[in-house]
Amino acid sequence: MSKKYTFIDLFAGAGGLSEGFIQAGFDPIAHVEMNEFAAKTLETRSAYYYLKNAGKLDLYRDYLRGEITREEFLGNIPDKYLKSVICETMSDTTLPSIFKTIDQMLKERRITDVDVIVGGPPCQAYSLVGRAQSNHMEHPMAEDPRNYLYKLYARFLKRYQPKMFVFENVMGIETANGGQTWKNIQSYLKRVGYEIECHEQNARTFGVLQNRRRMIIVGWLKNSGMSYPEFKAADVQAIVYDLLTDLPKLHPGEMASEYSSAEMSEYVRAHGLRTGEDVLTLHTARPNKKRDIDIYKKTIDLWINGNHKRLNYNDLPDDLKTHRNRTSFLDRFKVVEGDEPYCHTMLAHISKDGHYFIHPDPEQHRSITVREAARIQSFPDNYFFEGPRTAQFVQIGNAVPPMMACGIAREIAAQLRKEDRNGE
């Protein structure tokens, strides 16, 4: 990309969208995120990019190895990079101070235009799964205040008038509240000066080894000549095992901080998921009770030797059954499809237990580690997630895969270049 386009990331999470846009050559102005651990992850990633550009990545590796504290590590990073992460819950009350902070950053960096705004409000309020669960709750999702976060998103569009925006969300946004929420979102975004289109995209299209369907809404300034990008499917010759085979083998409760002697696959190398300089982090297997390990072994065996058959919870011997619910969630034990070109969708639920993401190797009989989950989401090994393990899994499960985000960003850049040429 000749010109370095700028972007602001709203509801940024752990930075999957940001990472993809940065990889595609965009320059981040600010990331707004309410969760403390996700915001720390964003700070760490901002520090990584500063050190990479300054040729000082040894300091980053010292931090990952635990040789220096976080305070010592961040003490080496200029304040403007850390300030770009705004840890704040967006609301009518907080927006003025968030705007003031971003305006100050734009002034200090002498940036006159925000080219793109990216991000998607928390998705539970729109998701098909969340709505099914809410039928049994005291406060159904029709009343969920998160349904109206798009109004705050629209206020950013109105204030900064980016040439384009990318609004990512879950399948179900079009039908939430009988379709009324989606109608409201469209009219709101159009009212602040944008034409919009919404299409389903799958992370598989962008080379991610995961079946992950999402709605990607793209908007562009009216009468700008831009349009919804066309995304060509990536030609990937790989299976999910290619993401896992170079990581050290673990049994439940074990950890590893050094790579094994196994060579990384061509897929891992070609997509930059690991380099020869990386420090292995977050590769610790959850401890498991003997009962769970026995179930894992049966689940893996069924998949490998039963022609990809899934375990039905009711088929387990009585001594292995502990759940009273025998009518729903019967597939609560699920193997990651190692011998397939993609696996099932990574979910934030992995933070609760690993039963839905069992490692496909029968010798390891465990759930996947944080690092393995990150790889399935296409995060590179040098991406470090802050916080306790549960928080790390939530960040990864909720993220947009960076490889998908990068593919989207490249086509957004192509639209912006087209608009630049038309404006000359």
Image (cartoon, rainbow, N blue to C red):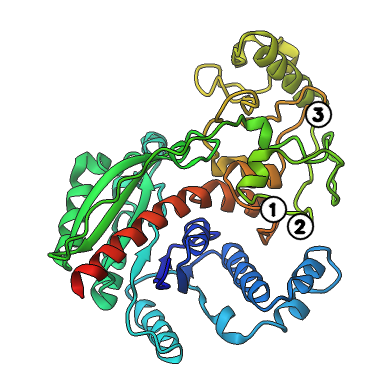
Q: Residue at x 52, y 56 (%)?
A: 16
**Quarter-wise, where is residue 264 in the image?**
top right
Give amino acid for label 1.
Asp
**Quarter-wise, where is residue 54 in the image?**
bottom right
User: Label 2: which residue?
Assistant: 278
Q: Residues within 10 Å of mark 3 (few under 14, many from 20)?
A: some
Looking at the image, residue 313 sits to the left or right of residue 246; the answer is left
Looking at the image, residue 322 sits to the left or right of residue 331; the answer is right
Q: Please say if the residues under marks 2 and 3 sit with CB atoms less than 8 Å apart.
A: no
Looking at the image, residue 399 sits to the left or right of residue 3; the answer is right
Q: Quadrant of the C terminus?
A: bottom left
* Lower sequence index among marks 2 and 3: 2
Spatial separation of the CA atoms under disc 1 and disc 3: 21 Å
Tell me residue 130's x, y (percent): 41, 40
* Lower sequence index among marks 1 and 3: 3
Report helix, strand or loop for mark 2: loop
User: Label 3: which residue?
Assistant: 364
Give amino acid for label 2.
Asp
Q: Residues within 10 Å of mark 1 (few under 14, many from 20)?
A: many
